[in-house]
Image (cartoon, rainbow, N blue to C red):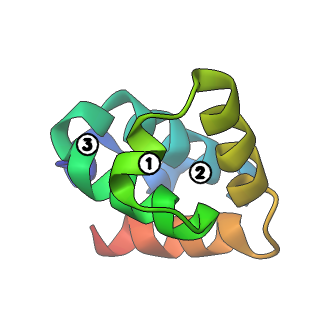
Amino acid sequence: MKLKDELNLKDKDSQMESGAELIVTAFSNLHLAQEDVNEFFGDIAGMTAAEFEDLELEKVMEIIEEFKEQSGILSFLKSAGRSV
């Protein structure tokens, strides 16, 4: 998704700000990795990529909110952003 080209995490004031930027950038580029994203979030939700793709937007947002609320996710995303 070429996130490395779009992110500048080194100048961020907080972990929250870095994580938020990574999430916004990633979701802005989802169309570039649609199959992988469907598989990833489908796995989190206990369903196939095709089942996830067919969900109503409201349910997709619920799954994404659950993902964001997982303990340590912002730290993980910040670390992942550095390695992209």
Where disc 2 sits, the SS reads: helix
Question: Of the residues under marks 2 and 3, which one precedes in the sequence?
Answer: 2
Marks counted in the figure total 3
User: Is residue 38 toward the left or the right of residue 42 in the image?
Assistant: left
Q: In this view, does 28 lie to the left or right of 74?
A: left
For marks 3 and 1, the one nearer the N-term is: 3
Q: Position of residue 11 (x, y in %)?
A: 51, 49
Q: How many neighbours does mark 2 have within 10 angstroms: few (below 14), some (14-19), or many (20 or more)? A: many
Say which residue label 2 marks.
18
Residue 33 point in image, percent of width and height: 21, 47
Give the percent coordinates (x, y) of residue 39: 36, 61
Residue type marked 2? Ser
Mark yes or no: residue 8 visible: no
Could you tell me the amino acid type at mark 3? Gln
Judging by the rendered image, the residue that carries numbered circle 1 is 51
Q: How far apart are marks 3 and 1 (CA)?
A: 13 Å
* Residue at the image point whose x is 29% and y is 34% from the top: 29
- Mark 1 lies on a secondary structure that is helix
Q: Which amino acid does the dot numbered 1 rest on?
A: Glu
Between disc 2 and disc 1, the foreground one is 1
Image position, residue 19 (x, y; %): 61, 52
Residue drawn at (50%, 57%) of the image = 41
For disc 3, the marked residue is 34
- The Cα atoms of the two marked residues, 2 and 1, are separated by 31 Å
Q: Are marks 3 and 1 in contact (CB under 8 Å)?
A: no
The quadrant of the rendering that contains the C terminus is bottom left
Towards the viewer: 80 or 42: 42
In this view, the mark in front (3 or 1) = 1
